[in-house]
């Protein structure tokens, strides 16, 4: 069996286990409800008088995902360690990488499915006016990449512990950090203390400026590379952590 | 099939496994015995490639576990301690998943799942979710997983743990039958299983192999092995003891229990290679003296006694840190 079919098998099992528990449905309902609340109530969708989805809808995603993605991903490795199935999985003809990628893809697909279920919002917007479909599509793409980046961080924290709650908290903190370094209130605070160049440099590590490009309808390869590198780096760390678990450190 | 060479594993400052070497060929069933914390599970985890050894080598079917883990792991079926399985799946879903990971698809997969479901008596729970199973059924589900690809090498960590007596019996005869064509390692705390299943037994104590024998050789280590137990009437214990002490090939005679009208004695041989000769000697003494024999047999030796002697002596020398 080649590596891809192993990954596919693992992804399918993981995805199946999401949907075999009511938690998945609760998660999706909460996600959709929050999307709606943020977009239509807090985002001032109606007050804007423009049928644009982009700002009021996607603006909230970095904050929404801050809690929802760790909630969806915290079990990925923690549960595997708690149940002892990690031992089963890694003594089958599966490389750690196949397991890491397979499990990550499953959770990512789950989040993408939840994101895709926001399509009634798109329909509403189309009904109310003539939105720029290109921007909506890039917005969704950016949002999916953002979710993937947070998720990879959550996979990493999930591998660190058997305790899902700890994994949740640590990944919220890290993801918050990834937002905060480029969040205007924080950058203005630091710009008083540090040279501008440094503040700019630090803020490039934030997801916000990279996410903003997609909201403008631009797919900048640097933004894509940014999100993909976060995923790659976090998953690499997951691999290191798992190797350490196995050798008993 | 399985070659383990000077395997060592430390967890921090603690040596869990300290220089274990053995080989298991096809057609052999190797029993792993040892007190709690001796390092049995740790050794098995290294053999199956879950834990990388701190030192030493494992090769399975000629594939080095560190250099070619995938081909080595393909040959192995493994039942980890505590029989973990994915709680949120059904028994059928779980077994199908493991079959798929092992590269089976379509009809082959279906046949493999059906086969192990039948072998492990899982028909009645096949569509039940794993987390609602009783402990024994969960154990059987994980056991089924380990044999789904009909592996050449089986590593079973306490395969009969938590099973009812009938199932224990089934699993033992299954292991024995499979052992004719496979190389099997299994660990257990039940000493009768050594007799029932193993062709060879290794006793591990504090990370080291302290015995590597066949079950019969293991018994031979017992003080009791080769001794003759006699129950007779028509004579007092003291008299019979006196008389038997002077018989040929007798080293010592002890009274097992003092009873008013029954002499119950144990006669120890001068050498362990006497086999039936000592029993015949005792019988002829009894006949010549006119004692009435109620019972006469040669002891085989008790595994629990051997186990205790071997593992206790070591702990006494250097208590566990
Ligand atoms: N991941 C680990 N980290 C630290 N110590 C460990 C780890 N795994 C095992 N040990 C230690 O290694 C020693 C051997 O453990 P192991 O599980 O191999 O024993 P065992 O022979 O299987 O015992 P049992 O009969 O109770 O199953 C124990 O002292 C245990 O505490
Ligand atoms: Mg054990």
Image: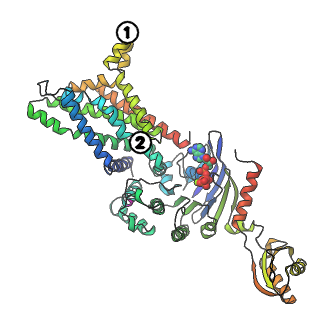
Task: Check disc 1 and report the residue beneath it.
Answer: A192
Q: Which mark is residue A176?
A: none
**Chain ID of residue with mark 1:** A
Q: Quadrant of the C terminus of chain A?
A: top right
Q: Main secondary structure of the magenta part?
A: loop
- Decide which of tag 2 and tag 1 comes sooner along the chain: 2
Do badges 2 and 1 share one subunit?
Answer: yes
What residue lies at 69% left-to-right and 64% top-to-bottom? B304
- CB atoms of marks 2 and 1 within 8 Å: no
Q: Position of residue B10 (x, y in %)?
A: 63, 42
Q: How many marks overall?
A: 2
Q: Is residue A45 left or right of residue B252?
A: left
Q: Is residue A218 visible?
A: no
Q: Which mark is residue A100?
A: 2
Q: Position of residue B222 (x, y in %)?
A: 75, 66
Q: Is residue A121 left or right of residue B119?
A: left
Q: Position of residue B104 (x, y in %)?
A: 38, 58
Distance between the Cα atoms at labels 2 and 1? 42 Å
Is disc 1 placed on a helix, strand or loop? loop
Q: Is residue A233 above or below residue B187?
A: above
In this rendered view, identify the residue nearer to me: B58 or B162.
B162
Q: Which residues are magenta?
A: B86-91
């Amino acid at each position: 069996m080649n590596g891809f079919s192993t990954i596919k098998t693992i992804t399918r099992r993981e995805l199946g286990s999401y949907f075999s528990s009511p938690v998945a449905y609760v998660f999706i309902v909460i996600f959709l409800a929050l999307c709606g609340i943020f977009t239509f109530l807090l985002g001032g969708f109606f007050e804007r008088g423009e049928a644009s989805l982009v700002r009021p809808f996607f603006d909230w995603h970095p904050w929404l995902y801050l809690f929802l993605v760790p909630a969806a991903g915290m079990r990925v490795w923690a549960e595997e360690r708690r149940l002892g199935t990690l031992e089963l999985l890694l003594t089958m003809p599966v490389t750690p990488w196949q397991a890491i990628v397979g499990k990550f893809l499953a959770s990512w697909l789950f989040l993408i499915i939840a994101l895709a279920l926001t399509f009634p919002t798109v329909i509403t917007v189309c009904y109310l006016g003539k939105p720029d479909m290109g921007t909506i599509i890039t917005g969704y793409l950016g949002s999916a990449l953002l979710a993937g980046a947070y998720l990879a961080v959550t996979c990493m924290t999930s591998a660190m512990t058997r305790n899902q709650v700890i994994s949740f908290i640590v990944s919220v903190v890290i993801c918050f950090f990834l937002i905060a370094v480029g969040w205007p209130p924080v950058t203005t605070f630091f710009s008083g203390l540090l040279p501008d160049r440094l503040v700019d440099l630090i803020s490039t590590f934030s997801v916000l400026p990279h996410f903003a490009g997609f909201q403008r309808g631009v797919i900048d390869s640097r933004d894509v590379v940014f999100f993909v590198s976060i995923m790659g780096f976090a998953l690499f760390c997951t691999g290191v952590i798992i190797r350490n678990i196995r050798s008993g450190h | 099939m399985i070659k383990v060479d000077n395997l060592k594993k430390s967890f921090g400052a603690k040596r869990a496994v300290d220089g274990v070497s053995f080989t298991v060929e096809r057609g052999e069933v190797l029993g792993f015995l040892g007190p709690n914390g001796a390092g049995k599970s740790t050794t098995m985890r290294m053999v199956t490639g879950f834990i990388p050894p701190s030192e030493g080598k494992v090769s399975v079917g000629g594939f080095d576990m560190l250099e070619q883990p995938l081909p080595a792991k393909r040959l192995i079926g493994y039942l980890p301690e505590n029989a973990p399985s994915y709680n949120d799946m059904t028994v059928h879903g779980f077994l199908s998943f493991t079959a798929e990971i092992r590269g089976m698809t379509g009809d082959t997969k279906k046949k493999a799942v059906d086969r192990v479901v039948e072998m492990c008596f899982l028909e009645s729970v096949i569509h039940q979710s794993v987390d609602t199973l009783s402990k024994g059924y969960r154990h059987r589900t994980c056991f089924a997983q380990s044999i789904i690809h009909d592996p050449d090498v089986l590593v079973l960590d306490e395969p009969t743990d938590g099973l009812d007596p009938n199932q224990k019996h089934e699993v033992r005869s299954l292991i024995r039958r499979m052992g004719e064509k496979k190389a099997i390692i299994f660990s257990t705390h039940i000493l009768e299983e050594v007799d029932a299943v193993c062709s060879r037994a290794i006793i591990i104590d504090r990370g080291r192999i302290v015995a590597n024998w066949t079950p019969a050789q293991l018994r031979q280590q017992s003080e009791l092995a080769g001794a003759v137990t006699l129950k007779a009437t028509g004579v007092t214990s003291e008299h019979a003891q006196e008389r038997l002490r002077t018989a040929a090939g007798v080293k010592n005679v002890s009274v097992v229990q003092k009873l008013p009208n029954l002499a119950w004695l144990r006669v120890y041989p001068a050498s362990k290679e006497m086999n039936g000769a000592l029993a015949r000697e005792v019988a002829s003494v009894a006949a010549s003296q006119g004692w009435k024999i109620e019972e006469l047999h040669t002891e085989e030796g008790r595994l629990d006694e051997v186990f205790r002697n071997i593992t206790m002596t070591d702990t006494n020398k250097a208590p566990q840190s």
